[in-house]
Image (cartoon, rainbow, N blue to C red):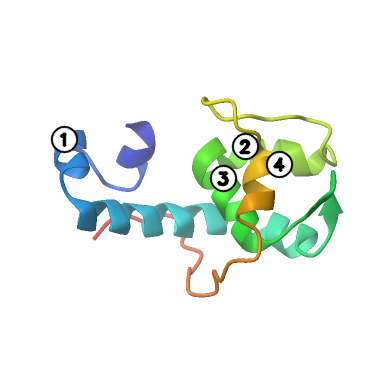
């Protein structure tokens, strides 16, 4: 709920019952994460960390599911910090599985909110 609040969603029940709102929230969170991780994207994109080729889409997917802090820790440690989400899936797996997707349409926005 804290993440939803950070992008302007205050009613979790309405959110769960509104697919269009969910899509808007997803894009807003991607925009916010892209802003926060832009330096990491610029520095690490194309490099290999712990056997994974780093891409913008992989970074954004990992941040969406594991948080920006986990992505930063993973990259800064050259993959030695084995960060996982609350379901036990590693940041490395998200980066690998979602790497190479088109994300140029996502604009970095510091305080992105759902409109």
Element carrying mark 4: helix
Residue under label 1, please give it.
13
Q: CA distance from mark 2 to mark 3?
A: 8 Å
Q: Nearer the viewer, mark 4 or mark 1?
A: 4
Instruction: State which mark lies toward you, 4 or 2.
Output: 4
Disc nearest the viewer among 4 and 3:
4
Label 1 environment density (alpha carbons within 10 Å; few <14, some 14–19, many ≥20): few
Q: Secondary structure at mark 2?
A: helix
| Point 42% across, 52% down: residue | 29
| Dot label at residue 42 | none
Residue drawn at x 55%, y 38% is 67
Q: Earlier in the sequence, mark 2 or mark 3?
A: 3
Q: Which residue is mark 3?
A: 63
Q: Is residue 73 above or below residue 112?
A: above
- Identify the image quadrant of residue 20: bottom left
Q: Secondary structure at mark 1?
A: helix
Who comes first in sequence, dot 4 or dot 2? Answer: 2
The C terminus: image quadrant: bottom left
**Disc 2 marks which residue?**
69
The residue under label 4 is 92
Query: Residue 82 appears at what percent x and percent y?
Result: 74, 29
How many discs appear?
4
The crowding category of the residue bearing disc 2, from other C-alpha atoms within 10 Å (few below 14, some 14 to 19, many at least 20), is few
Location of the N terminus by quadrant is: top left
Q: Position of residue 106 (x, y in %)?
A: 48, 68
The reply to whether discs 2 and 3 touch (Cβ–Cβ < 8 Å) is no
Answer with left or right where residue 45 lies relative to residue 62.
right
Alpha carbon separation for disc pair 4 and 2: 14 Å
Residue 58 placement (x, y as % from top left): 63, 55
Please say if 88 is above or below 112: above
Residues at marks 3 and 1, CA–CA distance in whole angstroms: 24 Å
Identify the secondary structure beneath mark 3: helix
């Amino acid at each position: 709920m804290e993440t939803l609040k950070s992008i302007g969603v205050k009613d979790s029940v309405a959110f769960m019952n509104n697919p269009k709102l969910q899509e808007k929230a997803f894009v807003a969170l991607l925009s916010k994460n892209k802003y926060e991780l832009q330096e990491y994207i610029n520095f690490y994109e194309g490099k290999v960390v712990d056997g994974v080729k780093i891409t913008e889409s992989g970074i954004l997917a990992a941040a969406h599911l594991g948080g920006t802090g986990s992505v930063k820790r993973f990259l800064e440690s050259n993959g030695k910090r084995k960060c996982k989400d609350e379901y036990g899936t590693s940041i490395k797996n998200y980066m690998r599985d979602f790497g190479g997707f088109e994300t140029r349409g996502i604009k970095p926005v510091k305080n992105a909110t759902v409109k």
